[in-house]
């Protein structure tokens, strides 16, 4: 079991980093739940969590999944699929100096509807035990102000789970061939011990930041996620510029984030935690950049203003389309055999000019001359159709970028 810090700001800062200095966001990784979870009715793809606590969170969720027999209906009935948030760059309610454990990306809330602050709650014991087995603290153990939806990875005072871990999917214990007793209960036959997992090692579905990012990894992460929300951050390189400045400003405005727009990577880190937290909420909600009805319909005049390259591409599309149609029709009704014959006659009359192997050249040319004229017209029609198809795709891509708001 991992050793977690005491629930004091000094201990948490030393273990996880200081939220006030922007030290949390660079250490956050996405954890993919083993079962379906929903935030306000929308499916949660991943939970952003501190890299030191992410393996323990995943282990607790996996234990819950095993306890329920990997049955989504049992998960839903227990209320565990009702995700109520994890990372949130904020202070403890009612305090102006003490950071919440949510600000460290080391806490998660479940089923807030039935387990809200001060409520008695109905959090299942197997859920409490799953987190307790990872050494986590449960808000239902608080003195005075109960918070039964809340689990945080800080020292839990040595509390132990009340039930054994589920054995779903594990092999049956080895039995002695004569007595039938489990081997680990017999002297001289100690049970084989499983290797102790490294608490710092990320499990398979905890994804660290890309170490090959050319610029700042936190900024690179935000650029990628803004682009996925249909903003235009420019080149995804982890470097500050006008593209990311405009995209970040638009996102903050659309989401109501009252923050000072950064002017550099250094000032960006001052608000990185808040931005990534809001991005995590937007992702959990399935939210995308809002667009007006006029933009969503994108009539030709709007498209021409915002994506002027569409005009020549559309002309190329129409020209190539009609040319491919004409060439295809010509392939069926016309032939160029006469021209091939004239060319062959000219070639044979001037063989003395070509210092080569006439037999080989004559053989190759005869095969080409024997091809039906329709073959040549079909090849031409196919090439023009390919140009028309690529032009259509370019038009469609630019149109969607305008309609979704990605293209401003």
Image (tube, rainbow, N blue to C red):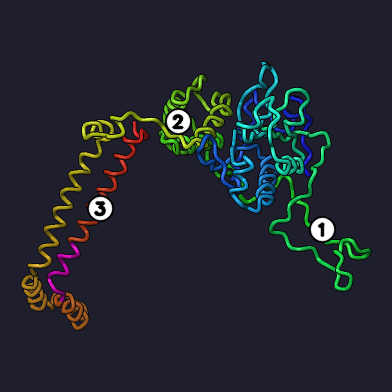
Left or right placement of residue 137 versus residue 309 in this view: right
Residue at 32 percent of width and 35 percent of height:
403
Label 2 vs label 1, nearer the camera: 1
Vertical placement of 35 versus 109: above or below?
A: below
Could you tell me how many numbered marks the image carries?
A: 3
Q: Is the N terminus in the top left, top right, bottom left or bottom right quadrant?
A: top right
Left or right placement of residue 361 versus residue 87 in this view: left
Q: Which residue is mark 3?
A: 389
Vertical placement of 114 versus 45: above or below?
A: above
Q: CA distance from mark 2 to mark 1?
A: 51 Å
- Indicate the secondary structure of the residue bearing disc 3: helix
Residue at 72 percent of width and 31 percent of height:
139
Mark drawn on residue 244: 2
Q: CA distance from mark 3 to mark 2?
A: 32 Å
Q: Which residue is mark 1?
A: 193
Q: Is the C terminus in the top left, top right, bottom left or bottom right quadrant?
A: top left
Highlighted range, magenta:
371-380
Residue at 56 percent of width and 45 percent of height:
36
Relative to the observer, which residue lies in front, 7 or 358? 7
User: Reading the chain from its start, which is encountered first: label 1 or label 3?
Assistant: 1
Relative to the observer, which residue lies in front, 153 or 379? 153
Label 1 vs label 3, nearer the camera: 1
| Mark 3 neighbour class, 10 Å CA radius: few under 14, some 14 to 19, many 20 or more | some
Label 3 vs label 2, nearer the camera: 3
Marks 3/2 in contact by CB < 8 Å: the verdict is no
Q: CA distance from mark 1 to mark 3?
A: 61 Å
């Amino acid at each position: 079991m991992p050793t977690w810090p005491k629930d004091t700001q000094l201990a948490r800062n030393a273990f996880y980093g200081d939220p006030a200095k922007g030290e949390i966001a660079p250490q956050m990784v996405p954890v993919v739940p083993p079962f379906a979870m929903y935030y306000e009715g929308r499916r949660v793809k991943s939970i952003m969590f501190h890299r030191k606590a992410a393996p323990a969170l995943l282990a607790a969720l996996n234990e819950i999944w095993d306890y329920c027999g990997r049955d989504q209906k049992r998960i839903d009935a227990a209320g565990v699929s009702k995700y109520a948030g994890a990372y949130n760059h904020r202070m403890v309610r009612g305090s102006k100096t003490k950071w919440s454990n949510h600000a460290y990306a080391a806490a998660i809330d479940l089923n807030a509807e039935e387990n809200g602050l001060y409520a008695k709650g109905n959090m299942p014991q197997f859920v409490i035990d799953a987190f307790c087995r990872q050494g986590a603290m449960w808000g239902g153990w608080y003195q005075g102000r109960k918070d039964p939806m809340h689990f945080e990875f800080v020292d839990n005072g040595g509390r132990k789970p009340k039930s054994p871990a589920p054995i779903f999917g594990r092999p049956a214990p080895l039995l002695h061939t004569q007595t039938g007793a489990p081997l680990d209960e017999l002297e001289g036959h100690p049970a084989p011990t499983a290797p102790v997992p490294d608490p710092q090692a990320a499990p398979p579905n905890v994804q660290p930041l890309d170490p090959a990012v050319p610029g700042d990894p936190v900024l690179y992460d935000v650029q990628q996620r803004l682009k996925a929300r249909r903003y235009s951050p420019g080149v995804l390189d982890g470097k500050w510029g006008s593209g990311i400045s405009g995209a970040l400003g638009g996102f903050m405005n659309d989401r109501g984030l009252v923050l000072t727009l950064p002017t550099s990577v250094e000032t960006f880190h001052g608000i990185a935690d808040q931005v990534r937290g809001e991005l995590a909420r937007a992702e959990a909600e399935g939210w995308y950049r809002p667009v007006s009805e006029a933009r969503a319909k994108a009539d030709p005049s709007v498209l021409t203003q915002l994506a002027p390259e569409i005009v020549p591409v559309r002309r190329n599309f129409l020209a190539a389309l009609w040319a491919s149609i004409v060439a295809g029709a010509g392939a069926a009704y016309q032939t160029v055999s006469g021209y091939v014959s004239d060319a062959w006659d000219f070639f044979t009359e001037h063989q003395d000019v070509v210092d080569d192997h006439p037999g080989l050249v004559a053989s190759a040319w005869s095969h080409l001359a024997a091809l039906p004229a329709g073959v040549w017209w079909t090849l031409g029609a196919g090439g023009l159709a390919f140009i028309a198809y690529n032009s259509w795709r370019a038009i469609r891509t630019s149109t969607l970028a305008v309609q979704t708001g990605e293209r401003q």
